[in-house]
């Protein structure tokens, strides 16, 4: 006997999808003042449910609502209303989401989920359009975003063939090592890594760090790390330079004004891991080639935030040189791979390291789309949870149910928890960061001639948050 049949032994079942507009509940029989509990199976009409509940004085009603399947759970059901004493263990065993005594709550949750799913679908369409305008293969874009902060269940439902007929691009960074030499290049490790922006040492690399913010230097030094007094000193004798700074301006200052590019030895490699506009990544690459044409430039932005950076589990979107300069060191590519693998695959997830063909600027282009989705998903998560609160739904249950369904997103899981737990201190990602990132999205979209009305609205929401004095607060505020 399935779970609904079991509940049918306790309730009179009324299928509202078949009962029509005149559906009613059975009146008490044999002169009794008490009627048998009713179980209402909601069809598509929330209005019909409201009418039936309103027009019947009977209070012992349980509403059962079928929800759309999620990525991993096919049969999802929400229910609300009066629970027969014997019904609770049945719905718990079935895995139904029980939203409390208000019989309208289950239907309202389905409405909320449908609205959020529609929003996610529109966001995915807008983001993919931006990616195509930036010259990205949609299938590669999906593969990259699937493991990043912009991921959602909706992305996997898109038929990319409607958008682009190109074949799926090669998506692993391992190809880069094969393209530029033998397979044993992977084992090569640089003797010194200069890291401007600080992370990395736990993987056993010799890392010398510099950060413009002294507390970061102090924490790194207290943990046994070696610090430099200037970017130029940091770059001296380093075989790999990693730039993980706030923006393109800081990267340019470090490389050219603070003389890091001149301090690097012959054949060193430069990895830019910051979130910058694709056009800025290209400009930095071209400027470096003019100053030092022996230094290959890798555009390798990251996704995953502070928690995943600390565990070496970042998603890295790496676009290296298309045509390596004859003056560059072939072994340098293997050393770059060694560094990026330490930052992305410490937990064995080699798929976190994604090779993006097309040269510098293309890694930033995928990050552009990811930040479009990530920023917009923060906004849609906040809106969905605020709506759930206004509807009187239990918030943690609503979030758990949303995470199991077609409106699920990485941000609902991560930032949604922060929103319910209260203001996070210290912040994992500040509102100021998304003011910058969403401004990059909107500006680049304008440069490419791509309309992004949803992203533009979200950009203004983050700007409003900063204007309220919340810029240094966690972006889940």
Image (tube, rainbow, N blue to C red):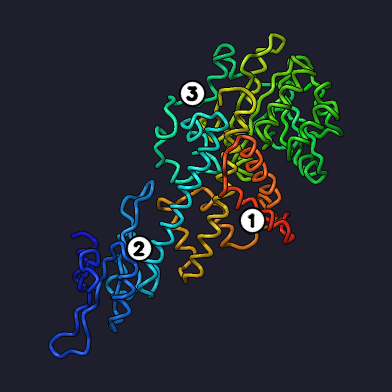
Q: Is residue 338 left or right of residue 4?
A: right
Provide the secondary structure element on which disc 1 rests.
helix
Report the disc number at residue 461.
Answer: 1
N-term mark: 3 or 2: 2
Residue located farthest toward the front when viewing the structure as drawn: 449
Query: Which is in the foreground here, disc 3 or disc 1?
Result: 1
**Residue located beneath label 2 in the image:** 78
Disc 1 from disc 2: Cα separation: 32 Å
Instruction: Count neighbours of disc 1 (C-alpha within 10 A) and say few if under 14, some if 14 to 19, many if 20 or more.
Output: some
Instruction: Count neighbours of disc 2 (C-alpha within 10 A) and say few if under 14, some if 14 to 19, many if 20 or more.
Output: many
Q: Quadrant of residue 296?
A: top right
Disc 3 from disc 1: Cα separation: 37 Å
| Labelled pair 3, 2 in contact (Cβ < 8 Å) | no
Instruction: Count neighbours of disc 3 (C-alpha within 10 A) and say few if under 14, some if 14 to 19, many if 20 or more.
Output: some
Provide the secondary structure element on which disc 3 rests.
loop
Residue nearest the viewer, comparing 431 with 19: 19
Tell me where residue 259 appears, x and y as whole percent.
Answer: 85, 26
Report the disc number at residue 170.
Answer: 3
Q: Which image quarter holds the C terminus?
A: bottom right
Tell me where residue 110 appears, x and y as whole percent.
Answer: 38, 61
């Amino acid at each position: 006997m399935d779970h609904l049949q079991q509940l049918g032994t306790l309730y009179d079942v009324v299928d509202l999808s078949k009962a029509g507009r005149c559906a009613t509940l059975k009146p008490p029989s044999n002169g009794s003042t008490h009627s048998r509990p009713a179980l209402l199976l909601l069809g598509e009409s929330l209005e019909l449910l409201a009418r039936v509940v309103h027009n019947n004085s009977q209070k012992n009603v349980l509403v059962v609502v079928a929800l759309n399947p999620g990525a991993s759970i096919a049969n999802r059901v929400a229910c609300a209303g009066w629970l027969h004493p014997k019904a609770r263990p049945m719905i718990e065993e079935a895995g139904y989401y029980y939203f409390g005594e208000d019989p309208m709550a289950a239907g309202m949750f389905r409405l909320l989920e449908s609205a959020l799913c529609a929003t996610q679908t529109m966001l995915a369409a807008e983001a993919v359009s931006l990616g195509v305008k930036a010259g990205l293969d949609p299938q590669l874009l999906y593969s990259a975003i699937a493991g990043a902060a912009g991921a959602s269940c909706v992305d996997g439902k898109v038929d990319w063939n409607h958008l682009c007929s190109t074949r799926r691009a090669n998506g692993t960074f391992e190809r880069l090592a094969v393209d530029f030499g033998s397979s044993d290049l992977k084992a090569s490790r640089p003797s010194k890594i200069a890291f401007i922006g600080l992370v990395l040492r736990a993987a056993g690399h010799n890392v010398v760090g510099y950060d413009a913010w002294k507390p970061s230097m102090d924490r790194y030094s207290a943990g046994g790390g070696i610090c430099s007094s200037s970017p130029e000193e940091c770059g001296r004798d380093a075989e790999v330079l990693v730039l993980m700074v706030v923006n393109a301006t800081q990267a340019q200052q470090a490389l050219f004004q603070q003389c890091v590019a001149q301090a690097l030895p012959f054949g060193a490699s430069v990895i830019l891991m910051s979130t910058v506009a694709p056009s800025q990544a290209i400009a930095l690459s071209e400027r470096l080639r003019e100053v030092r044409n022996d230094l290959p430039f890798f555009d390798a932005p990251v996704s995953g935030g502070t928690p995943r950076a600390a565990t070496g589990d970042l998603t890295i979107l790496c676009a290296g040189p298309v045509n390596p300069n004859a003056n560059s060191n072939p072994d340098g590519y293997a050393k770059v791979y060694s560094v990026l693998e330490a930052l992305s695959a410490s937990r064995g997830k080699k798929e976190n390291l994604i090779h993006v063909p097309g040269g510098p600027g293309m890694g930033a282009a995928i990050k552009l789309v990811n930040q479009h989705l990530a920023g917009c998903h923060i906004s849609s998560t906040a809106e969905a949870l605020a709506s759930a609160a206004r509807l009187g739904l239990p918030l943690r249950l609503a979030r758990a149910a949303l995470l199991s369904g077609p409106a699920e997103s990485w941000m609902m899981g991560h930032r949604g928890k922060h929103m319910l737990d209260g203001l996070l201190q210290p912040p994992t990602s500040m509102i100021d960061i998304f003011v910058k990132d969403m401004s990059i999205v909107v500006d680049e979209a304008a440069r490419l001639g791509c309309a992004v009305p949803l992203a533009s609205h979200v950009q203004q929401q983050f700007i409003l948050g900063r204007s309220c004095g919340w810029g240094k607060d966690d972006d889940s505020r």
